[in-house]
Image (spheres, rainbow, N blue to C red):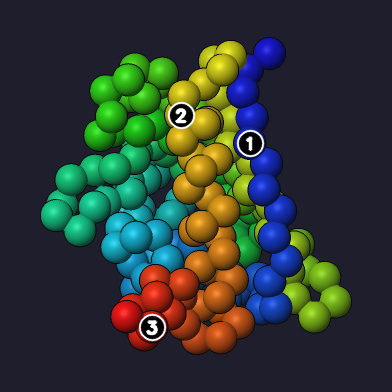
Amino acid sequence: MGSRFVYVIYIRTTPEKLWDALTNPEFTRQTWGGTHQESDWTEGAAWTLMFADGRAADSGEILEIDRPRKLVLSWRNEFRPELRAEGHARCTYEIETIDGGVKFTVTHESDKDDSELIKAVSNGWPAILSSVKSLLETGDSLAHMRQKRA
C-alpha cells in the first residue's frame, strides 16, 4: 500500500516563475531554510538538496521533467540514518495554469507502509510551500518576514 503525502496550493504567479522558485538556488535558499538544490535539471541527472555547510540533506535523480509543468524526483534523505535506510521515495511537482495564477500539487510517496520519511516531509512541505507562495506574491519569504519582525 505504501505512504503518501499530497499538498495543493494556489499561487498568484506564472508557471515559469514558480519553476524558477523551485529550482533556482537563489530562491530556494530563501524558502527552504537556507538549503539549495544542485542539478543540471535533465532527465536522468543527479539531484541534491544541500545544506549551507555543504552537506547533502537529500538526494536522488530526475525521473521526469517537463518544464514548467511537471518534475518527478527520486528522493532519499541523507542526514538521518533511519530515514536514509528507507531508500528512495518519489516526489512529483505538478504545475497547472489557472485563472490568475497556478495550482501547484506536490505528491511525495513511498512504497514503505507507515514511512517515517513521508511523515517528516509532510511536516516540512506546508512551511516551504507557504514560503514560496509568500515570496512569489509579496517579494518576501516567510523567513524574511520573521527576520523583519525580530
Disc on the earlier residue, 1 or 2: 1
Number of other residues with Cα within 10 Å of mark 2, as a class: few under 14, some 14 to 19, many 20 or more: many
Residue 49 in the image: above or below residue 134? above
Label 2, secondary structure: give it. Answer: helix
What x and y, as percent, mark residue 58?
34, 40
Residue 51 in the image: above or below residue 145? above
Disc on the earlier residue, 2 or 3: 2
Q: Please name the amino acid that badge 1 sits on.
A: Phe
Would residue 74 appear left or right of 81 to someone viewing this image? right
What x and y, as percent, mark residue 120?
46, 35
Residue 134 image label: none
Residue with the mark numbered 3: 149
Q: Please name the amino acid that badge 3 sits on.
A: Arg
Residue 5 image label: 1
Q: Please name the amino acid that badge 2 sits on.
A: Leu
Residue with the mark numbered 2: 117
Label 3, secondary structure: give it. Answer: helix
What x and y, as percent, mark residue 147?
33, 79
Q: Using the numbered discs, state the Cα–Cα distance from disc 1 to disc 3 in whole angstroms.
A: 32 Å
Which quarter of the figure has residue 136?
bottom right
